[in-house]
Image: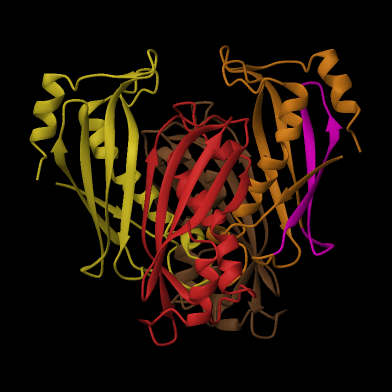
Chain colours: A brown, B orange, C red, D yellow
Amino acid sequence: MFVTIIEPRFSETDILGHINNTAFPVWFETARQDIFKLVHPNLSSSDWPMIIAHIQVDFILQTAYGDKVTIKSSISKIGKKSFDVIHEAYQNQLLVAKGNAVLVWYNYAQQSSSLIPEEIRKLLKQHQL
Amino acid sequence: MFVTIIEPRFSETDILGHINNTAFPVWFETARQDIFKLVHPNLSSSDWPMIIAHIQVDFILQTAYGDKVTIKSSISKIGKKSFDVIHEAYQNQLLVAKGNAVLVWYNYAQQSSSLIPEEIRKLLKQHQL
Amino acid sequence: MFVTIIEPRFSETDILGHINNTAFPVWFETARQDIFKLVHPNLSSSDWPMIIAHIQVDFILQTAYGDKVTIKSSISKIGKKSFDVIHEAYQNQLLVAKGNAVLVWYNYAQQSSSLIPEEIRKLLKQHQL
Amino acid sequence: MFVTIIEPRFSETDILGHINNTAFPVWFETARQDIFKLVHPNLSSSDWPMIIAHIQVDFILQTAYGDKVTIKSSISKIGKKSFDVIHEAYQNQLLVAKGNAVLVWYNYAQQSSSLIPEEIRKLLKQHQL
């Protein structure tokens, strides 16, 4: 499991007085940086090996400005060409949102998906729930 | 069906050369403004009657900077206390992403959900797919 | 003068009930798209010819969600290697913010600034205030 | 001096391969949270005592994704009704951007600026450059 601490930004609040829902996909992508580093340590964009196919977020409690948010991320499913990352966001020990993302192993030069290499599969399995 | 035209912003591109996935929840929320105006015409935050419970996006094709994106939005399901909005995003006549949002009828002063009023239900039905 | 119409996004509001200040640099960059197209019509990132050196915004009135914002942009100063763009943002005919950006003519492959070509200078002059 | 560590977000990169300029006003506002807490410890929006009048950023070096950015913030000028905050952003020990913001002491209920109270002035002076 990967843990990412997010300090909600003032610009992420909205007129309703809470954190706007669109902050969560940004936070969850930020939380996936640990996974990016795991499978692509140099983070170079020239041979970035993934493309995103799906994101979703369930909003459980309103999130406030002023208190840190802890995001716990894990690998859930590992398919032939894609894998799923699940995220849970906590503020003051309460689950405020959860979600997931589907990442496809992808070659941008060829614009095509490909099998997840065996060594990457092993790395992902170490962080599978 | 509601149609919203989005001009992708330079700041919404990312290092991979396309529009970053996190732009879509923002665009879809922007597309829901027509629905906000339908059910809450003055857009006043003091009695804003909805809270968001769920969002999701499927990414189908990469979206480019420089060409407009057309978002088509409709009401799909209407429940007792919530309704679903579905979105399709097109660029150059191609479906690049689709998604949905679940909006709960909500009283922020009481911090509780409530039944969708009958007159609102009628308005929503007029735009149901 | 270039005119860009912006529909403020719900996610651009903040907890104080108005549009957050950080939306304006995004809007002004969006307004510069007309200038990007003027000097670099294909908008290709591989030979993008500018880099930004400075931005500033003066906030004059609070900007509300729900009403369109009109941004008027012009070229002000044209130097040897850089030019200035000035922006004014109006909501309901009132000036709500103004600002400027300094763009340097730049070669990303060589990571160095260069003289603005004469044909570009002519194009910029046509839109100079 | 206040120090804020920012992990650049993937969504803050742009098509040119670096961090987009519009991330900096967001980061600098995030860095001002320490100053918000200093002068308004409960961070409550109902009696938020400041409004922003000006921001500016000078971009000195391109900022990369993958390395943390350290933002150093101080109070510079303290006027009767406003004060200036200056920010410097460093990545890998190099100054990549600097900027400032002007904050006006403000009563949102009355929609008018007011004198900075003496006790706030004292607090600000302790962090003046």
D51 versus A31 height, above or below: above
* Occupied quadrant, residue A77: bottom right
Asked if residue B79 can be seen in this view, the reply is: yes
x then y, percent, for residue A123 = 51, 74
Which residue is more in the foreground, B68 or C124?
Answer: C124
* Occupied quadrant, residue B124: top right
Identify which residue is drawn at 87% across, 39% down: B1
Q: Is residue A41 left or right of residue C66?
A: left
Magenta range is B67-96
How many marks are shown on the rendered structure?
A: 0
x then y, percent, for residue D4 = 26, 50
Give yes or no for residue B61 being in the magenta stretch: no
Image quarter where the C terminus of chain D lies is top left
Which residue is more in the foreground, C123 or A128?
Answer: C123
x then y, percent, for residue B109 = 56, 13
x then y, percent, for residue B39 = 76, 22
Asked if residue A129 can be seen in this view, the reply is: no
Q: Is residue C25 left or right of residue B83?
A: left
Which residue is more in the foreground, D100 or C86?
Answer: C86
C2 versus D116 height, above or below: below
Q: Is residue C97 left or right of residue B65?
A: left
